[in-house]
Image (cartoon, rainbow, N blue to C red):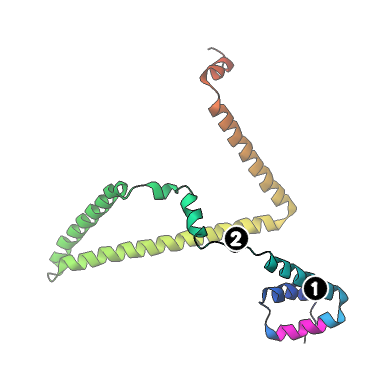
Amino acid sequence: MKRLDHDSYREWLHLECDGELPSADRSLLRQHLDSCAECRAESQELVALDNLLKESHIPVHRSFHDDVMSALPSAGWESSHPRSWAAALIVAVLLGGVGAALLGTSAARLEPTAPFIAALVAIVDLFRSTALAGAGLLTASWKGLGLAVQELLAGSVWNILAVGLLVLGLDYLLLRLLVRHNQPAESASRRTPPS
């Protein structure tokens, strides 16, 4: 059996305190605690801290979640009224109907039995396939971007410094644009030389 290092036992102490350590590992941890005074002291500290946290637990009102959620301002997408979506919904239905009609008439020439239903099924399948492909592409793009940034930052300290300088430069440009945008028109006109 492979001998565990000291850090693994320390991680197990935290897992045991949270109640997530498997029973097979508990016996190994107990054996290690019998032989290691440092881990035994850390275990006692963790137990004392856990007891202190349990004693200082404050019960929360049942309506706390509802009170907090009602006190928050509404998000931008929540404040828009459903009537504002009516125009987009009408356009989508019209485009779908026109597409179904065009597909239905061309499908009627090829297959005379129930062409309109077949055209509607084809359009629904098109929308479903498009949504699935878009969701997959979006997920893959974000994962790929995360992996690329992780690889860039893990490369060396110079990469981290370069990215840090890039971020600082972009912050500086943004602040300059904000300061310039907030200046009154008179002070801006005084700074520019007449031509």
Mark 2 element type:
helix
Amino acid on which disc 1 is placed: Gln
User: Residue lying farthest top?
Assistant: 194
Label number found at residue 3: none
Q: Nearer the viewer, residue 36 or 109?
A: 36
* 31 in magenta: yes
Q: Position of residue 180 (x, y in %)?
A: 57, 27
Label number found at residue 147: 2
Mark 1 element type:
helix
- Range drawn in magenta: 24-32
Between the C-alphas of marks 2 and 1, the distance is 40 Å
Mark 1, Cα crowd under 10 Å, few <14 / some 14-19 / many 20+, is few
Identify which residue is drawn at 60% across, 34% down: 175
Which badge, 2 or 1, is on the more N-terminal residue? 1
Q: Count the marks: how many?
A: 2
Identify which residue is drawn at 68% across, 79% down: 21
Q: Position of residue 8 (x, y in %)?
A: 76, 75
- Give the residue number, with chain letter if any, for mark 1: 44
Q: Nearer the viewer, residue 192 or 90?
A: 90
Amino acid on which disc 2 is placed: Leu
Above or below, 176 against 41 in this view is above
> What is the quadrant of residue 98 in the picture?
bottom left
Dominant SS type (magenta): helix
